[in-house]
Image (cartoon, grey):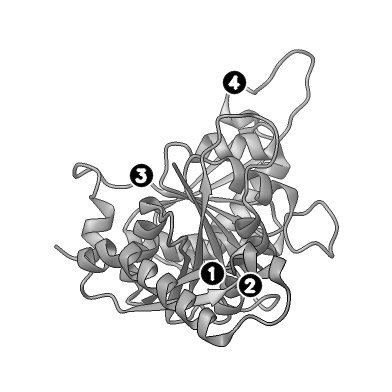
Amino acid sequence: MSERSAYVNESGGHPVPAVLAGVDGSPQSTAAAHWAAGEARLRGVPLRLVHAWPWLTDGESAFAEPDDLPAAAQRVLAAAAGEVRERHPGLEVRTDGVLDAPVDGLVAAAADTDLLVLGSRGRGGFTGLLLGSVSMAAAARSSVPVVVVREPGTAGGGDGPEVVVGVDAQDPQDEVLAFAFREAALRGARVRAVHGWDLPPVFGYAGGAVPATEIAQLEALEAKLLSLAVAAERERHPGTAVVEDVRLGAARGLVDASAGAALVVVGRRHRSIEFGPRLGRVAHAVLHHAQAPVAVVPHG
């Protein structure tokens, strides 16, 4: 069985329904739609383009018929679908309008798909921000992996030979590693497994320079833990090259490794609470600063 067919049919032989991309007419969402189209081709599934917007009425939460969709929403979807079909001929492209707040609508629409793809910023917000509130909130709440894509030319990345994945070698997450290895196999890329570690607090209390020999010993231990963490996925994907990369500082290591990468993969723990932050500090930093598309994979 090929890597592609293993990816598409891994859940009891049922194909992945679709890759979903949120569009709103912004350059970033157009870039996300094209990235999602390429991903849909790799997976052999349709692409769904979804435009979500809030609609305030006197007690009515949604229109009954598709013909009631506002003309502006139809134009956004038609324009995005036209661009995608022109660049990706033969790809099945579906469009859907969702009458809901953008985050709620996109997260709900993605629940029965395998991947949600969003632009880093939409039409609203401040132009100086690298990541918009919709992308951040969706990445924090979605039950499926979310890929955040920047507009081409603003942050680089996206076509490199590596899929970079952040690994907590002391608490590796199977879902995150499996996603990264499958994405690398689809692209014929290698995996760069980055484990960022920090010096134990005792060194900070002691003050002064840390002996190089002790740093080397600690780094060697972290490297062994990383090897153990990726061993199972190495065995499942014998044709995928793997680079094990141990660095001081998790977020900085991933951001540095993102330059020229095809994709950066980080994890995000499922949370049962409805309020408060849901992205860890590493995922948050990578989403804001990585130079490649970033996949946030829920786990736990």
Earlier sequence position, callout 4 versus callout 1: 4
Give residue 150's quadrant in the image. Answer: bottom right
Residue at mark 4: 64
Amino acid at dot 2: Arg
User: In the image, what residue type sits under mark 1?
Assistant: Gly
Reading the chain from its start, which is encountered first: label 1 or label 3? 3
Residue contact between numbered discs 2 and 1, judged by CB atoms under 8 Å: yes
Q: What residue appears at the point 54 percent right and 69 percent down from the top-left corner?
A: 196
* Distance Cα–Cα, label 3 vs label 4: 25 Å
Indicate which disc, 3 or 4, sits on the residue closer to the N terminus.
3
CB under 8 Å between callouts 3 and 4? no
Q: Residue at x 59, y 40 (%)?
A: 141
Q: Secondary structure at mark 4?
A: loop
Picture coordinates of residue 135, whole percent (x, y): 66, 51
- The residue under label 1 is 196
Q: Quadrant of the C terminus?
A: top left
Q: Does residue 201 lie above or below 142 as drawn?
A: below
**What's the residue type where badge 4 is placed?**
Ala
Nearer the camera: disc 4 or disc 1: 1
Counting residues from the start of the chain, the first of labels 4 and 2 encountered is 4
Residue 55 visible in the current orientation: yes
Secondary structure at numbered mark 2: helix
Nearer mark to the viewer, of 4 and 2: 2
Badge 3 is on which residue?
Answer: 17
Q: Secondary structure at mark 3?
A: loop
Image position of 88 (left or right of 228): right
Q: Which residue is mark 2?
A: 252
Mark 1 or mark 3, whichever is nearer to me:
1
